[in-house]
Image: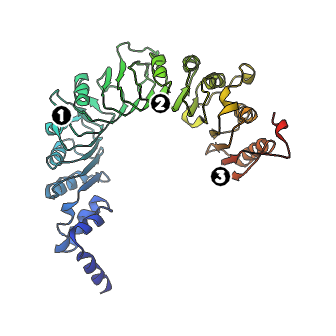
Amino acid sequence: MYHSRQEDRISALPDDLLVRILLSIPTEEAVSTMILSKRWRFIWTMLPVLTYQERKVSVWLFLNKSMEFHKAPVLQILSIRLGPHCPTDADVGKWVENAVNRGVRELFFTLQWSADPTRLPKSLNTCKTLLHLRLSHKILVDFPTSSCLPSLERLQLYYVVYKDEASLVALLSSCPVLELLYVMRNEDDNVAKFSVKVPSLRVLLYFNAMSPDENDVVDPGRSLVVDTPALKHFYIGDHSGDSWSIKSMPCLQDVFIIGQSFHDMSKLLRSASAVSYLGLHLTDELAVYCSTIEFPQLIQCTIAPCDSNWMDSLILFLGNTPKLKELTVDYSLTYEPPVASASWMLRFPDPECLSSSLEKFELKDYVGRKEEKELVEYILGTSKCLRTVTISLRSNLKDKETIMETLKAIFILRFDVQRVIGDGLLVVRMVENLAVGPNNRH
């Protein structure tokens, strides 16, 4: 009797409030409420957000039926994720067309069936309401030059296949207000010259998982072209060996570079010379460029060691960052952390930033190697403005306690250890240890 009265109270709520309640649960569960009573039969059909994720073979059939009965005048978000169980003869395009016809604003479509990549309906090419589009995997990107997506602000293309290079150009050209582009590429996506020419773009994330063939032969016809004069945030990961053509980017604020494509690297770094944040997979080749370019506005930097001479490269690079305040060395971003060469500290003068500006130092994925300890001691011994040091141990280390005690000993000789947080994480506030005295820091 109690449950019946409670259900009646909920059923008496206005439709818009019931819709908000249903939005808090998965779409399949929301649709199932139609059997509760006549009052509930059509509430789910007014949901402005529909999310379908393949958990069983019949999800595509459920999607068909629920989309057929859905009556909301505006579909704000449609998210579909279908895997290998989806029948290869399913008409997946009609779900997208249904959403476009009802003014969809955000469309996320992942298709990982066993069939070939499929085209989406032509109506998508001129959708005026679309703000955010994400296409993933077995989607064939086929956009004609007549395409027009006047409202699209965010575009994500994950491991899709392009009809040809012209389709990619047509898609990007159809987005006059595009601000964010996120691209993840696989082999055989049917594009050799990947051109990103978008005047309005503010954020570009580009990751190319392809790599040269087993003989390290690079196709000279493959390239990345970036012409984005308004770009502020640029994150690029590229191990393909493709050449890069980077136009001037005077508005850049932060850049992260991962990979081993060094064609036109100097131009990219010069475009980034005024950034406040820079992340680098620090290789010997990259260090050569960095050592010749000043970064006078750089405040934060993340370094991922890549070569055996990476500490030499780090010192050379830091020599051109006079205002650096925060330095992070992240071993977790490298596949096989290199062993630094010996006597690296003796080769170069101490960078100016260590004595005049560096306030925070962080070392991630610490395992206790000799060069790691040397780096910590070097930073402590040369940094006069340092306030905080954070060191996190690699999660799978077996002897964390011993390594942590060794680390503490390094700090206690010079500074008061203020905090130890959690398992394998050391945070030190740099307060001078008066018992030792400033003259004993070195």
Alpha carbon distance from label 2 to label 3: 32 Å
Question: Can residue 355 be seen in this snapshot?
Answer: yes
Residue at x-position 30% and y-position 51%: 54
Q: Which mark is residue 131?
A: none
Q: Mark 3 points at which residue?
A: 423
* Residue type at tag 3: Asp
For mark 2, give the secondary structure: strand
Q: Position of residue 83 (x, y in %)?
A: 30, 45
Question: Can residue 90 be seen in this snapshot?
Answer: no
For mark 1, give the secondary structure: loop
Q: Position of residue 98 (x, y in %)?
A: 15, 48
Question: Residue 216 vs residue 147: left or right?
Answer: right
Q: Mark 1 points at which residue?
A: 148
Mark 2 or mark 1, which has the lower sequence index? Answer: 1
Q: In which quarter of the image is residue 250?
A: top left
* Residue type at tag 2: Val
Q: Which mark is residue 255?
A: 2
Alpha carbon distance from label 3 to label 1: 53 Å
